[in-house]
């Protein structure tokens, strides 16, 4: 039996200003999430991106070609109903943050990690008040309770759209510090992504590139850049 696929049923996608944000309509009917909630986003630029994704659909709808729609759906249907749980999951990455775990050798890798990650840890200390302790090796090191509390408070300040982006930024890198730096715009998103790949880049320099691993890494990189862009669009002034 052939797999059933949803077909395009609308002629035009438009953005609409609503109480509390912006929506998208298909031939005048409000777009809804998979859970049947009205899709409402905080800014016009984000609504425009979503509308453009729907306008770009051919005869058969391809959900994978609509990343902004999928992220907005996730924010509304999944993150909003369990905000505290998602925030706690993200904050827990501070306990084993990538930036704290350094290689025991070789020296060149250790130096590369320190040059990239030490400034990020210093930013977390000065900007958030969260001093984290770096260590060499894979044995877990206990982080200061006060630092973890401050990181959790920082995460909980975000709204559901920012938290949705932050979830992906953190889980893709393994670093709460790098995820927070990305949404703060401390460095360009692609530069932060490369910081999270120091170990992998070093291994490639030693043993060559594995094509399968490289393809998987590129998928993750694109997902990271999308999450950063989703966050950026959700922060733009609603009047823009």
Image: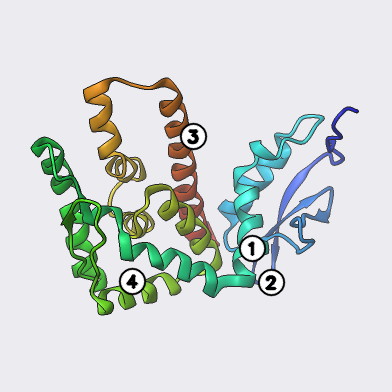
- How far apart marks 3 and 2 lie (CA) works out to 36 Å
Q: How many angstroms separate mark 3 from mark 4 (CA)? A: 28 Å
For the residue carrying disc 4, how many other residues have a C-alpha within 10 Å: few (<14), some (14-19), or many (20+)? many
Q: Residues within 10 Å of mark 3 (few under 14, many from 20)?
A: few
Within the image, what quadrant is residue 122 found in?
A: bottom left
Q: Which residue corresponds to the image point at 13% horizontal and 40% vertical from the top-left? A: 105
Judged from the image, the secondary structure of the residue bearing numbered disc 1 is: helix
Q: Which residue is mark 1?
A: 78
Quarter of the picture containing the N terminus is top right
Residue where numbered disc 3 is placed? 219
Relative to 121, is 3 on the left or the right?
right
Q: Does the image show residue 152?
A: yes
Tell which of 123 and 17 is nearer to you. 123
The span from disc 4 to disc 2 (Cα, nearest Å) is 32 Å
Verify CB contact (< 8 Å) between mark 2 and mark 1.
no
Say which label, 4 or 2, has the lower sequence index: 2
Instruction: Give the x, y percent position of residue 12.
Output: 79, 42
The residue most toward the right is 1
Q: Is 15 drawn above or below residue 55 in the view shown? A: below
The numbered mark, 3 or 4, whose residue comes first in the sequence reads: 4
Badge 2: how crowded within 10 Å, few (<14), some, or many (20+)?
few
* Rendered location of residue 130, percent (x, y): 24, 71
Which circle, 4 or 2, is nearer the viewer? 4
Give the residue pinned by disc 4.
151
Estimate the spatial distance between the alpha carbons at disc 2 and disc 1, rounded to whole Å: 22 Å
Q: Residue at x 29, y 53 (%)?
A: 98
Mark 2 or 1: in front is: 1
Q: Which residue is mark 2?
A: 19
């Amino acid at each position: 039996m052939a797999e059933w696929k949803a077909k395009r049923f609308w002629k035009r996608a438009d953005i609409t200003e609503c109480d509390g944000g912006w929506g998208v309509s298909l031939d005048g009917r409000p777009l809804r999430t998979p859970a049947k909630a009205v899709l409402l986003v905080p800014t016009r630029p984000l609504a425009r991106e979503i509308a453009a994704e729907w306008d770009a659909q051919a005869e058969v709808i391809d959900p994978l070609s609509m990343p902004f729609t999928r992220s907005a759906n996730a924010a509304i249907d999944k993150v909003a109903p369990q905000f505290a749980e998602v925030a706690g999951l993200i904050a827990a990455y501070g306990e084993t943050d990538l930036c704290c775990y350094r290689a025991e050798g070789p020296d060149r890798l250790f130096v590369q990690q320190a040059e990239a990650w030490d400034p990020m840890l210093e930013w977390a200390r000065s900007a958030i008040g969260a001093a984290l302790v770096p260590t060499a090796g894979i044995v877990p090191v206990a982080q200061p309770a006060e630092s973890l509390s401050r990181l959790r408070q920082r995460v909980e300040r975000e709204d559901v759209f920012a938290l949705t982006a932050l979830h992906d930024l953190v889980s893709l890198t393994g670093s709460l510090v790098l995820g927070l730096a990305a949404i703060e715009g401390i460095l360009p998103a692609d530069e932060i992504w490369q910081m999270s790949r120091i170990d992998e880049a070093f291994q490639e320099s030693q043993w060559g590139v594995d094509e399968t691993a490289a393809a998987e890494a590129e998928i993750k990189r694109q997902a990271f850049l999308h999450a950063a862009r989703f966050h950026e669009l959700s922060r733009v002034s609603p009047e823009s």
